[in-house]
Amino acid sequence: SAETVINEDGVDLDFRVESDTITHALFVDGATGNTTVGGTLGVTGVVTANAGVVVDNITIDGTTIALSSGDLTLDVAGDIILDAGGQNIILKDDGTEFGQIYQSSNHLHLYSSINNADLKIQGNNGGATVTAIELDMSDAGSAYFNHDVNLPDNGKLQLGASQDLQIY
C-alpha cells in the first residue's frame, strides 16, 4: 500500500511503500528531505551527494576518503593506478609526512622526508627480514650492502668523480 500525507500548507510530503513483510521499504520525509530505503537501492544514473557519502564506516567528502576504524583494502581485478597531476605521491603516518614518490625531469624519485632518515630496501629471507641495502642520509647517502656486490661479465666498478679507480 502507499500513503501520502500533505500538511495543510501543502509543503510537507511523506511517501511510504509498504508490504505485508516490509514496513517502510521506501520512506521520503518531506519535512527533512531525508529518504530511507529498506532494501537495495538501484540507480541507473548519476548519484550526486554534495554533503558527502557515508558507507558503513567509510566517509567520502570532497577530496577525502576517511575510514573511522580498521584497515582499508583496495582489491581490484585490474591494476591500481595512482595518477597525481601534481607529480608527488605523498606518504604520511597519522598526518606526518615521512616520504614521497615523484617524478622530475623524467626521473623517478624516492624521497625520505624525515631529517636524516635512511632509505632501506628489505626483503624476506627464510622468514626473517633482511636489509639488503641501506642508504644513510645522515652520511650524505652512503650505501651499505648487507652482502656481496656482483657485477656481470665485463662490468666494472668505477670510483671517484673522474673514475680515478676502476676495477674490472
Image: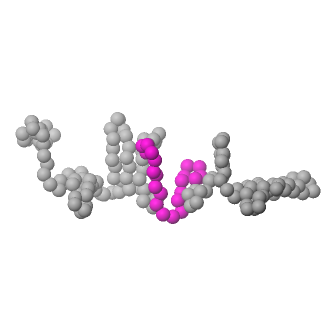
Look at 63% across and 53% down and name the residue there: 52
Which residue lies at the image location 9% right of the left edge and 38% below the top edge?
153
Q: Quadrant of residue 56?
A: bottom right
Magenta stretch: includes residue 92: no
Q: Which residues are magenta?
A: 60-80
Q: Nearer the viewer, residue 84 or 3?
A: 3
Who is closer to the viewer here, 133 or 55?
A: 55
Q: Nearer the viewer, residue 129 or 19?
A: 19
Q: Is residue 152 above or below residue 26?
A: above
| Residue 145 showing in the rendered view | yes
Q: Is residue 128 above or below residue 160?
A: below
Q: Residue at x 32, y 38 (%)?
A: 107
- Percent across and percent down for residue 22 are 73, 61
Q: Residue at x 13, y 46 (%)?
A: 150
Residue 85 locus on image (x, y percent)? 47, 39
Residue 158 visible somewhere in the drawing: no
**54 and 17: which one is in front?**
17
Q: Quadrant of the N terminus?
A: bottom right
> Mainly helix, strand or loop, the magenta region?
loop
